Image (cartoon, helix red, strand yellow):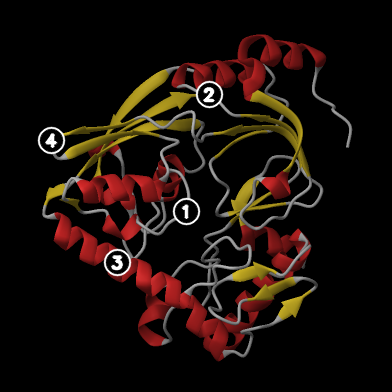
Amino acid sequence: MNLTLPIELKAKLDKELGNEVEYLVPLSDLSYWKIGGVAQCVVSPNSLKSLQKALKITSEFSELPRLIIGDCSNLLFDDEGYNGILIKLGNGLNELRFENDEVYCEAGVWVPELAFHCFRRGLAGIEHICGIPGRIGGLVFMNGGSQRRGILENVVSVDVITEKGEMKNIEASNIEHSYRVSPFQGKPLVIAAVRLKLERSTRAIVRKRMHEILASRRKKFPRKLPNCGSVFLSNPKMYDVIGPPGFAIEKVGLKGKRRGNAQISELHANFIVNLGGAKSVDVLYLINLAREEVKKQTGFSMDCEVRYVSPEGQLMQAHEYTQSLFDIA
């Protein structure tokens, strides 16, 4: 792939952000699935000021796709790559500050690290996130969590940056949310930092809860092969009748099903693993197959937790793309 960014944009990025910018980056190096072509440009800001600069500069080129990413632990990139700019929130945005029973975190704070520091202080309430790979900004965006909980339960406020680089604060009372849904999805706002409310407890109690969660994850989840974690969201109605997505997929006989070098995990059927050199179309095929078979045999629909990123910059739940890709209504 050749670099096709406007010369003026490249010049501005190089001048203002220097070594925080990379060009022609293999997406398979960024993705937990180890899948994807080449991205035209990846900006990794090392401060909130740099993030504001990156957003302001790139907003001047609105014809180009732009996407904010974290550790890409729930993203599926296309084999054709990404024809625009990715702004990656990571270690450069990792300020973590405790104030009594609240904690302020910049968007790039590593989620397991946050859980560990809460444990060290005997603070409870977010133990359920201790085994989730990714950054707190992405977790807030997805209202992610485990044990059927979401991180927005603990949010006091969220600092966001507009697409033109302006900082705003949003209080919890203005943040409506539901299971794996946040008001930041589909809006031109970038999560810069979050403040969380915790509960006073003891290190022993918090440690016990975290150990139980981590032990359960190690027992059930595939850890040796590249994957993005849970592919499908839990459907409460299906859960009450059939069970969670992994059980439903196993029940319809698809556990271990393979397409190319992508496979529905033999350990947990709500995971799709990369056996080595898997293609995005192989993963999408398995997503579509699992969804259609579960619908056919149980009557319940499963929506994806994983997001698909198109070369043109569209971000959508993966099943939405498979419906058009495989011409399924």
The nearer-to-camera label among 2 and 1 is 1
The nearer-to-camera label among 2 and 3 is 3
Tell me, yes or no, whether the two marked residues, 4 and 3, touch with CB atoms within 8 Å. no
Please name whichever residue, 29 or 246, is drawn nearer the observer in this view of the structure: 29
Tell me, yes or no, whether the two marked residues, 1 and 3, touch with CB atoms within 8 Å. no
Please tell me which of labels 4 and 3 falls first in the chain.
4
Question: Which of the image's four quarters has the C terminus?
Answer: bottom right
Please tell me which of labels 1 and 4 falls first in the chain.
4
Tell me, yes or no, whether the two marked residues, 2 and 1, touch with CB atoms within 8 Å. no
Q: Which mark is residue 163?
A: 2
Cα separation between marks 2 and 3: 40 Å
Q: Position of residue 314 (x, y in %)?
A: 67, 44
Q: Amino acid at mark 2?
A: Glu
Cα separation between marks 1 and 4: 26 Å
Q: Position of residue 79 (x, y in %)?
A: 79, 52
Which residue is denoted by mark 3 in the rendering?
211
Crowding at mark 2 (Cα within 10 Å: few <14, some 14-19, many 20+): some
Give residue 324's quadrant in the image. bottom right
Cα separation between marks 4 and 3: 25 Å
Which residue is denoted by mark 1 in the rendering?
133
Using residue 131 as the reference point, say whether residue 104 is left or right of it: left
Give residue 157's quadrant in the image. top left
Cα separation between marks 2 and 4: 33 Å
Q: Secondary structure at mark 3?
A: helix
The nearer-to-camera label among 4 and 3 is 3
Which residue is denoted by mark 4 in the rendering?
100
Q: Secondary structure at mark 1?
A: loop
Cα separation between marks 1 and 3: 16 Å
Q: Position of residue 130 (x, y in %)?
A: 35, 56
